[in-house]
């Protein structure tokens, strides 16, 4: 039986606005929505890397591919009015911690003002039934404690990126209370939720200063990879894991309204909570002639221990992780090898998506 929200019978013909569709996770999600039969409009800047999954997998084929900046409220108002989306999935963001230190103003502007403009366009135009705003596991006030964070834990954010995403959570709470309240659902018809996921891996991630891309680039040049914080523990998972959660959450919001509003965690199980160094060691076992690693101390703050409690999503949405960390790393490496071999990367990406979807 297919999990709720992952069935073509639900998504076929649904008008979906997806922000950030040119990014890594956005590209995977766009392809998945296409496979499910949704009518997808993507709104984003041009791909931020060269190469990019968006271009390699020809993600823009078969969708309404719109380029623009979320900080342009006029463009968003015009787009939402034209497309009349039933479901909005908001993934667009400046997603890198270190970039947040380099450009805090740009990070807050993209993440906070961009999210505010999207919410305002939805409010002014109306007609949207379900909206999922994707933030991050780093929205929590990290106490470095051993137990995982639940959705009702205090928000925080030490660095500009994390803080900007916590601000987005507060925006969502404010708009939900002020304009999309549960008791007035019959009037506005919108159910709003936020989704918090951990560190994602997968084929097609070419972003700078992300672990797996950095490892594969270094080892391809037969150089050791440089790690800033090898003992840091993160909730690793393939990008398809939280994306499945976003789809299930959006479908539940659409079908059942504000019963599913609020914040949701989508993180891996305890077995896949590994340190950065352990992940690199696991990958080295699958890479011939891996050049090893070196440690270079970082002068920037990074969380040492961060775990998510996803029991709410498992119990209420029926969401679960399907690939172990070992399988995730293997699929990521397989994708990379196929790309280096000159294979058709749209076909390769869709094949991996199909393998994952069969497990639902």
Image (cartoon, rainbow, N blue to C red):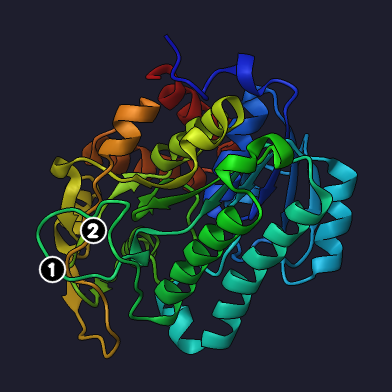
Residue 106, horizontal then vertical, whole percent: 60, 82
| Residue 56 seen from this side | yes
Q: Foreground mark, 1 or 2?
A: 2
Disc 1 packing (10 Å; few <14; some 14–19; many ≥20): some
Judge by depth and name the residue closer to the eye, 206 or 33. Answer: 33
Q: CA distance from mark 1 to mark 2?
A: 10 Å
Q: Quadrant of residue 218?
A: bottom left
Quadrant that contains the C terminus: top left
The numbered dot on residue 314 is none
Name the residue at the left extreme.
146
Q: Residue drawn at (13%, 41%), measured in percent from left and top? A: 271
Q: Quadrant of residue 101?
A: bottom left
Decide: is 182 above or below 104: above
Q: Residues within 10 Å of mark 2 (few under 14, many from 20)?
A: many
The circle on residue 234 is 2
**Residue 77 location in percent, x, y?**
84, 58
Relative to 84, residue 353 above or below: above
Residue lying furthest front in this view? 183
13 or 263, which is in the foreground?
A: 263
Q: Quadrant of the N terminus?
A: top left
**In the displayed structure, would residue 156 be above or below residue 122?**
below
The residue nearer to you, when weighing 112 against 235, is: 112
- Residue named by callout 1: 231
Q: Measured along the vertical axis of the image, is residue 16 above or below residue 123?
A: above
Q: Secondary structure at mark 2?
A: strand
Name which quarter of the figure residue 69 lies in.
Answer: bottom right
Residue at point 78%, 40% (across, down): 127
Label 1 residue SS: loop
**Residue 152 image position (x, y, % from top left):** 31, 54
């Amino acid at each position: 039986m297919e999990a709720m929200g992952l069935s073509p019978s639900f998504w076929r013909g649904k008008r979906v606005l997806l922000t950030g569709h040119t990014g890594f996770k956005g590209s995977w999600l766009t392809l998945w929505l296409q496979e499910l039969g949704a009518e997808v409009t993507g709104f984003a800047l041009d791909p931020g890397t060269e190469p990019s999954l968006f271009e390699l997998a020809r993600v823009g084929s078969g969708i309404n591919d719109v380029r623009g900046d979320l900080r342009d409220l006029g463009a968003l108002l015009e787009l939402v009015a034209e497309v009349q989306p039933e479901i909005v999935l908001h993934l667009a963001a400046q997603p890198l911690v270190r970039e947040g230190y380099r450009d805090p103003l740009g990070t807050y502007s993209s993440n906070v003002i961009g999210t505010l403009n999207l919410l305002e366009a939805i409010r002014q135009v109306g007609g949207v039934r379900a909206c999922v705003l994707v933030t991050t596991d780093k929205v929590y006030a990290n106490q470095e404690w051993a137990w995982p964070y639940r959705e009702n834990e205090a928000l925080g954010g030490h660095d500009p990126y994390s803080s900007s995403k916590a601000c987005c959570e507060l925006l969502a709470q404010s708009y939900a209370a002020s304009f999309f309240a549960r008791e007035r659902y019959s009037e506005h018809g919108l159910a709003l939720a936020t989704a918090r996921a951990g560190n994602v891996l997968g084929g097609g991630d070419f972003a700078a200063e992300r672990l797996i891309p950095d490892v594969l680039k270094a080892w391809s040049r037969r150089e050791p990879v440089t790690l800033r914080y090898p003992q840091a523990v993160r909730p690793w998972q393939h990008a398809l894991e939280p994306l499945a959660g976003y789809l299930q959450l959006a479908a539940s919001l659409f079908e059942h309204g504000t019963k599913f509003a609020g914040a949701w965690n989508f993180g891996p199980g305890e077995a896949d909570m590994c340190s950065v160094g352990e992940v690199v060691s696991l990958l080295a076992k699958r890479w011939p002639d891996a050049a090893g690693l070196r440690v270079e101390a970082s002068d920037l703050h990074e969380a040492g221990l961060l775990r998510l409690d996803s029991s709410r999503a498992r119990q209420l949405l029926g969401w679960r992780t399907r690939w172990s960390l070992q399988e995730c790393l293997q699929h990521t490496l397989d994708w990379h090898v196929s790309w280096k071999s000159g294979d058709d990367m749209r076909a390769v990406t869709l094949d991996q998506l199909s393998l994952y979807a069969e497990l639902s």
